[in-house]
Every structure is written in C-alpha cells, then in structure tokens.
Image (spheres, rainbow, N blue to C red):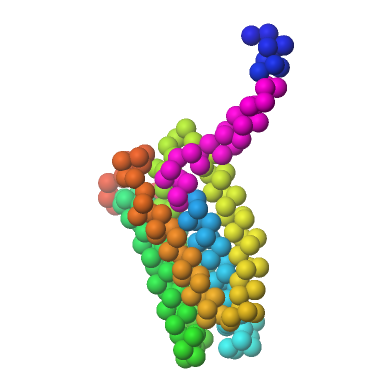
Amino acid sequence: MTAEAKEDTSSRPDAPTVRRRTTFGSLRTRNFRLMAAGQLLSNTGWWMQSTALNWLVLSLTGSPAAMGLTAALVYLPTLLLGMAGGVLADRYPKRRIVLVNYAGWASLTALLAGLTLAGVVQTWQVQVIAAVCGVVTALCYPAQQAFVSELVGRAQLRNAISITSSVTQLAGLAGPAVGGLLISAVGPGWTFLITAVCYTAPLAALTRIRANELHALPRAPAARGQLRA
C-alpha cells in the first residue's frame, strides 16, 4: 500500500471510531465490563469509608495519633500478608477469593455502620474492624489483580490493566470528596452504610459473570516452600 493510500485510510470518517475501539477494547468483553463498573463503585466506596473512618476516630478521641494508628491497621496487613495472598491466588479459584473479599468488606462496613448509627461505637471497635478489613484486603487483593487476566485473556490484558488503573485513579479522586460531602450531610454512620451498599456492586457483577467465557489460568498445586519462593 502506498503512503497516499495509507493516508487516505487513516483520514476516513470512521478512523476515530477505530482508535476509540482500540483504546477501550477490553470493555467489549462482557465479563470485564461488569467488573469494571462494579469496581468503580467499590473503589469509590473504599475511599469514602477511609475518609469517614479517619473522621470518626478523630471525633471519638481528638487524637491524630489514634487516627494514624487506625490507618496503619488498615494497610499494615498488606505488608505482612501480601505474599500469603499471592499463594492463595495461585492455589484457589480467583473468582471465589474475590467474592470473599467484597463480601467481607460489605459485612464489616455494615457492622461499623450499625455501631455508629446506634451511638455505641468505640475506638477499639473501629480499630478492630479496620484491622480485619486490612487482613481481608491483604489476602484477597492479589487474586483480584490476577482475576483481570481471566476476564479478558492475554490479548486484551494490557488494555484491561490500563482501564482498571484509570478506574482506581478516578475513584481515588472522587471517593474522598463524596465521603466528605456525605459526612457533612448525613454523618459517618450513613456514610458507612452507603459504602457497604457500594461493595455489593461487584458482588452482583460476579454473580452475573459467565464462567464459560473466563480465561482460567492453571492453578499451582499446594507444595511446601511456595511462600518462601
């Protein structure tokens, strides 16, 4: 094909559509589209919860140190248990682990909402729930990341990872702002409850995923030394 012909092809009216389809190509996969929508809501909810959690601890204790400790309890398990989560992702069905992850988040956040709305919440309760949320995240997050490849397959994996990253960044921008508005409007208890509802979005998506369209990866057999390796 000559240079002129190439230029004519690229200048056709439908050329922008072709580029747009390439940019969002993985969203044409139904399973990934469902999960991307669910993760947008759940990730936004995660940041709403983090904002409300910090505000609640600060209002209960008046101590920035207590607020920092609570945040540490959420994220420290990832440092300590992240590799164990990777072993779980290698050994067990990733879809099942992701279901446990979102079900755990929804249940724990609903419990926190109930305690807060009832007016009986205490700092130690908030910190225990924060720590358990951190453990659930640490053990399940590697499977959640690896599950993307099963949703789209190798050909669309790079595009799917880019979209997933964009969803995470968008939620990180919107979540704290929405959380702050909700705290101001209805208080932290209702914010937690709304967050728990957000966590049900990926649960609904997972129940609608077509298992026969997944690109299942081979699971590693259980063996000693995998964590060390």
Apparent side of residue 82 relative to residue 48 in the rendered image (left or right): left
Total marks placed: 0
Residue farthest to the bottom? 120
Check the picture and name the quadrant holding the N terminus.
top right
Asked where in the image residue 175 lies, by quadrant, the reply is: bottom right
Residue ID at (63%, 27%): 14
Residue 132 falls within the magenta-colored stretch: no
Residue ID at (57%, 55%): 168
Q: Say if 210 sits above or below 104 in the image.
A: above
Residue 89 position, x and y percent, is: 37, 52
Q: Say if 77 sits above or below 219 in the image.
A: below
Residue 33 position, x and y percent, is: 47, 46
Q: Say if 4 sits above or below 82 in the image.
A: above
For the question of whether residue 114 can be seen, the reply is yes
Residue ID at (46%, 89%): 118
Residue 121 position, x and y percent, is: 48, 88
Residue farthest to the left? 222
Magenta stretch secondary structure, dominant: helix
For the question of whether residue 98 can be seen, the reply is no
Residue 186 position, x and y percent, is: 59, 80
Q: Nearer the viewer, residue 222 or 61?
A: 61
What residue span does the magenta drawing correspond to? 10-35
Q: Nearer the viewer, residue 22 or 135?
A: 22
Residue 24 falls within the magenta-colored stretch: yes
Q: Say if 101 sits above or below 191 in the image.
A: above
Apparent side of residue 19 relative to residue 83 in the rendered image (left or right): right
Apparent side of residue 167 relative to residue 85 in the rendered image (left or right): right
Residue ID at (46%, 79%): 112
Residue farthest to the front? 13
